[in-house]
Image: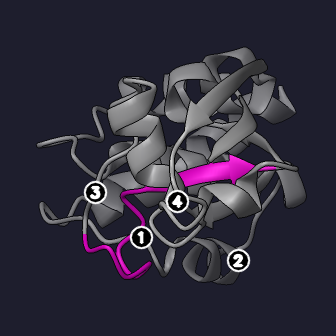
Amino acid sequence: MSYTIQVNGTKHVVDVEGDTPLLWVLRDTLGMTGTKFGCGMAQCGACMVHANGQPVRSCMLPVAGAASLSITTIEALHEDPIGRHVQQAWLALDVPQCGYCQGGQILAATALLRHYPHPTEEQITEAMAGNLCRCATYVRIRAAIRHAAATMAG
């Protein structure tokens, strides 16, 4: 069956089964490999995307459910002013080690700062709790979130 999905501002018609996870449509059908497969059970955050501005795990979102949503992946996050600040903070503080989880981490941080421009430590902990980092760069991730918030504030 065919589904029309909007990804990074562009509509795509994909011919896949409706229960195909959005993750596989992004990676295998559309060639957008910035969204990573981590666990396949929505527990690690590597597959995070934004759906209508909200962070979601694309490994658990069927393409049929994504058809009415505006999806943003890490490939287009630089177009979002908050996303751009977060990405710049990640670079400034040299956050990534292996980098595998960083797309999901950056998308989660961007969603956090969209809702809480000056997050407390508790809000950072809550927003980032479901994003795992194999390299344990959590201290640098938290510092980058605080750095992005500070640069956004001017």
Quadrant for the C terminus in the image: top right
> Could one spot residue 34 in this view of the protein?
no
Residue contact at pointers 4 and 1, CB within 8 angstroms: no
Among numbered discs 1 and 3, the one appearing first in the sequence: 3
Q: Amino acid at mark 1?
A: Asn
- Region in magenta: 39-51
Among numbered discs 1 and 2, the one appearing first in the sequence: 2
Secondary structure type for disc 2: helix
Q: Amino acid at mark 2?
A: Gln
**Quadrant in the picture for residue 138:** bottom left
**Quadrant in the picture for residue 65:** bottom right
Residue on which disc 2 sits: 123
Residue on which disc 3 sits: 37
Q: Amino acid at mark 3?
A: Phe
Q: CA distance from mark 1 to mark 3?
A: 13 Å
> Pointer 3: residues within 10 angstroms few (<14), some, or many (20+)?
many
Residue contact at pointers 2 and 3, CB within 8 angstroms: no
Q: CA distance from mark 4 to mark 3?
A: 9 Å
Residue on which disc 4 sits: 58
Q: Amino acid at mark 4?
A: Ser
Q: CA distance from mark 4 to mark 1?
A: 13 Å
Q: CA distance from mark 1 to mark 2?
A: 14 Å
Q: Position of residue 49 (x, y in %)?
A: 59, 49
